[in-house]
């Protein structure tokens, strides 16, 4: 039996994933100044393949943002933890990771996009994904009911914006997440 080459569609999907992974790493490392040539180099594809998948830098940045939002929203449904409160805080940690890594992508998009663009409706999608986690944790009396998810996400975003290293910000996040726990839980 001979091995047949992968289908053209599977190969194209694999290239697209490689490009997105390479772009995520490149933008995280070098910020908004990352060139399309650098993304292609990191992905191990030619410029024609890059532009066949993403006709412009703007299109690549949009795809990165949508991809990351999809991952965080999907994580809300699959997050693990021993209790509803643990699942919520684990998802908030994943949200924090998203916020700290998406900044170069959003900055790059804002250079050429109006904030009313539907791609920026990630907040609404995050709220829809996280509300069931918060409701379950509050119903289990594990998380304070003094705050709604908008406020909690704002706290996480504020910590992500604090200047310093990830090691500096991590204890701040830990303190906020501990503060969400009910004293009687």
Image: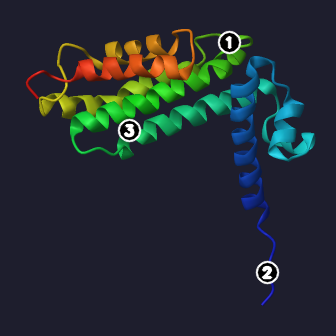
Helix, strand, or loop for circle 3?
A: helix
Q: Left or right: 93 with respect to 185?
A: right
Q: Left or right: 46 with respect to 131?
A: right
Lower sequence index among marks 1 and 2: 2
Q: Left or right: 49 with respect to 168?
A: right
Q: Is residue 118 visible?
A: no
Displayed quadrant of residue 158: top left
Instruction: Quickly name the residue at label 3.
Output: 76
Q: Would you place residue 40 above or below residue 180 in this image?
A: below
Q: Nearer the viewer, mark 3 or mark 1?
A: 3
Q: Position of residue 26 (x, y in %)?
A: 75, 31
Q: Would you place residue 151 above or below residue 178 in this image?
A: above
Instruction: Quickly name the residue at label 1.
Output: 110
Q: Would you place residue 142 above or below residue 33 in this image?
A: below
Q: Left or right: 38 with respect to 84?
A: right
Helix, strand, or loop for circle 2?
A: loop
Furthest residue toward left: 184
Instruction: Quickly name the residue at label 2.
Output: 3
The local crowd at label 1, few if under 14, some if 14 to 19, many if 20 or more residues have their Cα within 10 Å, is few
Instruction: Tell me if label 3 and label 1 are in contact, CB under 8 Å.
Output: no
Q: Which mark is residue 144?
A: none
Q: How far is the residue under mark 3 from the one under mark 2? A: 39 Å
Q: How far is the residue under mark 1 from the one under mark 2? A: 46 Å
| Residue at horizontal 22 percent and vertical 38 percent from the top | 84
In front here: 108 or 182?
182
| Residue at horizontal 31 percent and vertical 22 percent from the top | 177
Q: Quadrant of the C terminus?
A: top left
Q: Quadrant of the N terminus?
A: bottom right
């Amino acid at each position: 039996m001979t091995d047949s080459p992968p289908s053209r569609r599977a190969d194209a999907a694999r290239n697209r994933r490689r490009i997105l992974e390479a772009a995520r790493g490149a933008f995280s490392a070098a910020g908004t100044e990352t060139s399309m040539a650098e993304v292609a180099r990191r992905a191990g594809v030619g410029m024609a393949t890059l532009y066949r998948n993403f006709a412009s830098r703007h299109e690549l940045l949009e795809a990165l943002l949508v991809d990351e939002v999809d991952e965080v929203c999907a994580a809300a449904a699959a997050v693990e933890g021993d209790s509803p409160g643990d699942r919520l805080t684990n998802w908030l940690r994943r949200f924090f990771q998203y916020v700290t890594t998406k900044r170069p992508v959003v900055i790059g998009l804002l250079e050429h996009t109006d904030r009313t663009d539907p791609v920026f409706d990630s907040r609404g999608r995050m709220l829809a994904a996280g509300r069931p986690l918060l409701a379950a944790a509050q119903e289990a009396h594990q998380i304070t009911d003094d705050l709604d998810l908008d406020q909690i996400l704002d706290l996480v975003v504020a910590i992500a914006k604090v200047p310093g290293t990830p090691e500096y910000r991590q204890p701040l996040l830990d303190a906020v997440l501990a503060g969400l726990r009910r004293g009687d839980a």
